[in-house]
Structure formats: C-alpha cells, structure tokens
Amino acid sequence: MILTLLMYTLIGFGAQIIDGSLGMAYGVSSNTFLLSFGVLPAIASACVHTAEVFTTGVSGFSHFKMGNINKTLFLRLILPGIIGGVVGAYILTTIPVNIIKPLISLYLLIMGMLIIVKALRKMPHTDREPRPILLALIGGFFDAIGGGGWGPIVTTTLIARGHNPRLTIGSVNASEFFVTLAESIAFFAILGSTILENWLIIVGLLLGGVIAAPLAAWMVKRIPSRALMFIVGGLISALSLRTIILVFIG
C-alpha cells in the first residue's frame, strides 16, 4: 500500500508542478495515468477533482501572494465555470464521451499552435477586459468530462487572445478552486461512497499536489512571459496531438 501511495503522490506532485506553473494539465496528466491503471473515467475524474479541491486552494492562495492575479478576470470566471462543471459531471456519469474527446483535443491543438505563433511574432500583450463567460462555461464542462481541461481551455484561449500569461495563469488557477469544489460536490452527490472506496488515489494526489503548489507559483513568477507562451503552446499541442493519434489508431 505504501508503494501505491507513493506512486500516486509522485503523480500528484508532477501534475501540480505543470498545472501551477503553466496554468493547466493537472487533470489531463493525472487522469491519463489513472485511466491507464484501469480506473473508470467517472471515478478517475471524481478522484482527481476531489484532490484538486485542496491543491487548487493552495495554488490559488500562492498566486494571490505572488501577485499573479487579475481580479476582474478571476471573478468573471467563477460562476459560469461552476455551471459548466456541474453539468459536465452529470453527463460524464450517464453518457459516453468517445466523440467529445477528439473534438476538444483538435480545438486545443489549434489553440496551442496559435499561442506559439503569437510568441514568435512578439505581439504585445493587452490589458483589455476579457468577456470570458462562455469560455468559462465550456471550460468547466469539459474539465468535468475529461478529468481535466479547465486550464487548457481557459488559459490557452485567453493567452492566445493576447492577455498577459502570468496574470492569466494565476487568475485561472485561483478561480479553478471554486469550479473544482462544485464539480466534486456534484460527483459525490451522484456517485456517493464509490469515490471514498478509492481514497488511496485521492490522498496520494493530494499530498503530491499540496507539496508542489507553492513551488509552481514561484516558478511562474520567475519565468519570462514569452518563454511561458512557448511552453504552454508546446505542451498543449503535444498532449492534444497524442490524444488525437490514440483515438484514430485505437
């Protein structure tokens, strides 16, 4: 049991380093491992989001302390993100997602490539106020369905529109706490004690994530914005392309 717990802890640590420093991919990376171990999609997503309630809380607080927050953007993401997340949690427990997964991966691949192009063109960032209601609704929905996606969808799109990567990453990470909390409540309401039977997964992901969250927030404060854009764009493009390939060859 100790080795199993250590394995889940390492997964949680690595996933939170990625998520906290790049604003995405905690759920994507950790959920991929869980599914490869035979965990059912609904249970995997439920466990990931239960652990994320704590990790996103620590990560969000760390970003506030580091000054990585656009308060207007932060507040506008919360409510639509919650609505989309709850709806997605319900659908995941009732409807297969074989069609949805390749579609969102294709979208993310395009957005990742767009970010890289913007970084190469050295386009200046803008302080214009975003209107992210629909974006947050979609992000929350796919986050619950795919076990991850809030960061990839919301962060990627906002950065691709020209918003400052550091403030975008911090704001999206902070708002993710409230979205994740709502999704976890929805999963518990639908699946009940089945989630608690997989407590080892939750504890491992939680321990690794909480340890890594402050370090990730420090990293995003130090990494230049243009470097962040390359990393974000490359990560999302690679993960999305891999998913699309696996869908077609599977």
Image: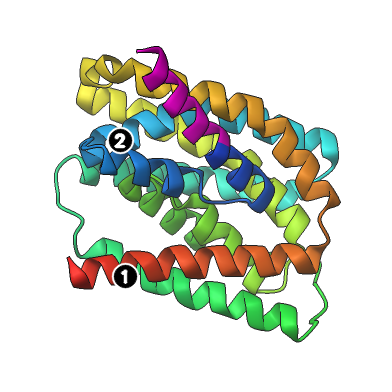
Indicate the position of residue 15 as horizontal and vertical percent values: 53, 41
Residue type at mark 2 is Ala
Indicate the position of residue 158 as horizontal and vertical percent values: 63, 65
Q: Earlier in the sequence, mark 1 or mark 2?
A: 2
Helix, strand or loop at mark 2: helix
Q: Which residues, given as a range, are shown in magenta? A: 1-13
Residue 182 shows which numbered tag? none
Residue appearing at x 45%, y 41% in the figure:
82
Q: Residues within 10 Å of mark 1 (few under 14, many from 20)?
A: some
Q: Report the quarter where the N terminus lies.
A: top left
Residue appearing at x 36%, y 17% in the figure:
200
Does the magenta stretch mainly form a helix, a strand or a loop?
A: helix
Residue 7 falls within the magenta-colored stretch: yes
Helix, strand or loop at mark 1: helix
Indicate the position of residue 75 as horizontal and vertical percent values: 65, 45
Which residue does the numbered mark 1 point to in the structure image? 244
Q: How is the image coloured?
A: rainbow
Indicate the position of residue 86 as horizontal and vertical percent values: 35, 40
Q: Answer yes or no: is residue 32 visible.
A: yes
Task: Measure the C-alpha gap from mark 1 to mark 2.
Answer: 20 Å
Q: Report the quarter where the C terminus lies.
A: bottom left
Q: Is residue 59 above or below residue 223?
A: above
Residue appearing at x 20%, y 55% in the figure:
97
Q: Is residue 34 above or below residue 5?
A: below
Which residue does the numbered mark 2 point to in the structure image? 44
Nearer to the camera, 76 or 32? 32
Q: Is residue 211 left or right of residue 190?
A: right
Q: Is residue 121 left or right of residue 43?
A: right
Residue appearing at x 30%, y 30% in the figure:
187
Tell which residue pokes out farthest to the bottom in this image: 121
Q: Residues within 10 Å of mark 2 (few under 14, many from 20)?
A: many
Tell which residue pokes out farthest to the front in this image: 3
